[in-house]
Image (spheres, rainbow, N blue to C red):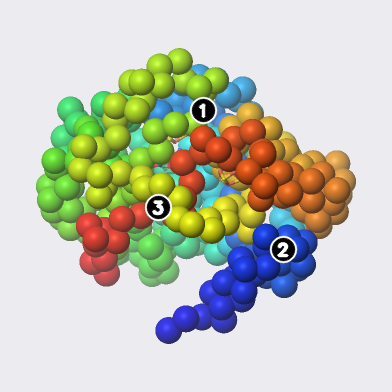
Amino acid sequence: MIGKRSLRKAASARLMKIDPELALRFCPPSSISVELTSACNIRCFCCPVGQGKIPKGRMSLSTFRQILGLLPRHIRKLDFSHRGDPTVNRAFPELVRHAQRKGYQTDLYTNGLLLDRYIDEIVECGLTTIRIDLDGASQESYARYRNGSSFERVRDNISRLVEVRAASKGGYPRNIFMICVVSTFNEDEIPEIQALARTLGVDQVLFKTAITSYGGKYYNDQAAQDDIAPKNRALARQPRAEGFVCPFLWRGAILHNGDLIMCTVDFEGEYRIGNILEENSYKRVFFGPRARAMRKRILSGTAPLCGSCGVVDENHYIPEISLTFA
Ligand SMILES: C[S@@+](CC[C@H](N)C(=O)[O-])C[C@H]1O[C@@H](n2cnc3c(N)ncnc32)[C@H](O)[C@@H]1O
Ligand code: SF4
Ligand code: SF4
């Protein structure tokens, strides 16, 4: 059944090209990405953070509290994901606990390598969803993309988290998802990865098409990056559909310092529309003159990153091979 929000969103998408401000007032964002740190502990093949191009910074609990105090009521879900890995910020369980007390749904994306430091806290802090990357069935295939990580440690961390959740009273995180970015390194291992996810006891395994271009300035060898696209075109990212309207126009991301940017493809703040802490308001920034001008540029295709960015839909998961176990 199609929900009320989906119907509203569909109407808003039609309106977006005619009057973006009206479209967003009719259907404002219900979720936002929040960057708990811009630092990472591994070096993924395509990720600009992994290429060491991004200055490091972390969000403190007091900044996080201030930010939540400024968010409007229509935002009900926080996605802890952008540059960096949220688990590198040692305070992350406390931040999640605070968000949960304030009634937010919370969704955390992680490479999973450091989870063993936090298993009990993750189960106790009330996190709604955790998405852990494990994109291979062996160290060899996995670490070609997740450079500097350990297949065994991440696998064991997932297994332990599932076990501890099963023994807990609360049953958090409600969803434990395993994420597999499909590339030429792992496209021949899909059945093994599905079997591994089943054995580990996760609720879902979600296969995702890979972005292979974040723009030349982030990566020195674009040809090597292009080469990781799977040979099986059905598993590769497809071109945008006719009439594409970027889903990030209904989202945005807050950086660790309170900067609000339009989308999570923007690793260097080129789509920065202001700082909600300095303005002491989310709404003044999100509906302000800089945001309006940026939206016009995005919609007209003249914003700097939109032409080469790999975003073609909401989440890029591949339903034909993704599995739900729970
Ligand atoms: C940029 S990461 C940031 C959060 C966290 N560090 C992580 O890797 O899970 C957000 C999501 O993008 C996924 N991702 C990483 N490289 C990707 C790529 N080349 N194409 C598509 N998604 C990718 C990650 O697996 C994760 O699910
Ligand atoms: S994709 Fe995530 S884990 Fe990999 S380098 Fe980027 S931020 Fe780190
Ligand atoms: S860069 Fe990509 S994700 Fe960002 S606004 Fe443009 S099309 Fe959307």
Of residue 36 and residue 267, the one placed in the foreground of this image is 267
Secondary structure under the numbered disc 2 in the rendered image:
loop
Q: CA distance from mark 3 to mark 2?
A: 26 Å
Task: Identify the residue at image location x=79%, y=41%.
Answer: 274
Which disc number belongs to residue 96?
none
The label on residue 215 is: 1
Task: Please name the amino acid that badge 3 sits on.
Answer: His
- Mark 3 or 2: in front is 2
Which label belongs to residue 316?
Answer: 3
Q: Residues within 10 Å of mark 3 (few under 14, many from 20)?
A: some
The answer to whether mark 3 is within 8 Å of ligand 1 is: yes
Please give the name of the residue rendered at 77% of the width and 67% of the height, measured from the top-left corner.
22
What kind of residue is marked 2?
Ile
The quarter of the rendered structure image containing the C terminus is bottom left
Measuring from the top left, give residue 36's x and y in whole percent: 59, 41
Q: Nearer the viewer, mark 2 or mark 1?
A: 2
